[in-house]
Image (spheres, rainbow, N blue to C red):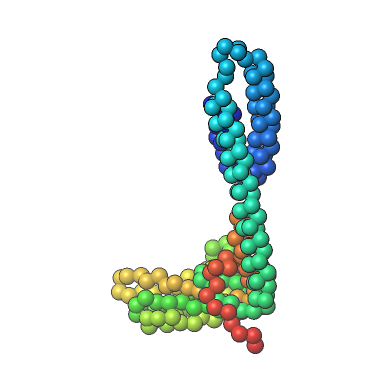
Amino acid sequence: MSTVQQVLSVPDRQGMQEAARARIANNFQDFLKLLTTQLTNQDPTAPLDTNQFTQQLVMFAQVEQQLATNSNLENLIRLQGTAQLTALTPLIGRTVEVDGSALPLQRGEAAGTYTLSSPTSETTITITNSAGRVVHTARGETGAGTHGFYWHGRDNAGNSLPDGVYSLTVTGQTGTSTVQASTTIYGRVTGAERDRDGSIQLRLGEVKVNADRIRSVMPDR
């Protein structure tokens, strides 16, 4: 395996760009030393194949160029993420609707919507806490379509629960069939951040959601 092939066989991992570039530079210097030594000590009656050396030089140049291209693309992605993060700043303090079931209880209130694909004979709204324990149940609408939902932040016994992350589930019963409703949640934006994977996320209290899940933004009151 040639020196260039060895470099190309290195797994692509985060943070390997600089290491790969340094390795290319070191190997290139070693290659030039080897080339100079071979040319100095070659047999004049059987000179070395210059095509092979030329191919090696071209491969080094191509790999170095590819590493530079990847680095530039990563810089562009970071800049784009920063621009997206800045663009979301005006949403802080606003209420947004996002797809999902992670329900933020903020200031003792929570709200959302659920959509039934068909009429049901009975609809149940269930809220569970972060430990998976059911803390509140309520009857929901039975007609097909989208319906609003509001929770006062109390459990079934009437006790006020602390703000935090809860889970919303809405199911409908039609005869022996169970219908799972799709849900959205409302939350007041308290911050925006870039996650480790590069995605831009909004914080709704303790709930984090990807910015691309925003369905609507409520007007300022």
In the picture, residue 219 is in which quadrant? Answer: bottom right
Q: Is residue 119 left or right of residue 109?
A: left
Picture coordinates of residue 193, whole percent (x, y): 66, 64
Q: Is residue 35 above or below residue 199?
A: above
Residue found 61% across the figure and 79% down from its top: 95
Q: How many marks?
A: 0
Picture coordinates of residue 68, whole percent (x, y): 63, 46
Q: Is residue 64 left or right of residue 140?
A: right
Picture coordinates of residue 206, whole percent (x, y): 64, 67
Asked if residue 130 shows in the view, the reply is yes
In this view, the residue farthest toward the left is: 175
In the image, 36 versus 193, the foreground residue is: 36
The C terminus, quarter of image: bottom right
Residue found 63% across the figure and 57% down from its top: 76
In the image, 149 versus 46, the foreground residue is: 46
Picture coordinates of residue 147, whole percent (x, y): 46, 82
Residue found 57% across the figure and 35% down from its top: 59
In the image, 123 versus 19, the foreground residue is: 19
Residue found 49% across the figure and 78% down from its top: 113
In this view, the residue farthest toward the bottom is: 221
Asked if residue 157 shows in the view, the reply is no
Q: Is residue 46 above or below residue 58?
A: above
In the picture, residue 88 is in which quadrant? Answer: bottom right
In the picture, residue 111 is in which quadrant? Answer: bottom right
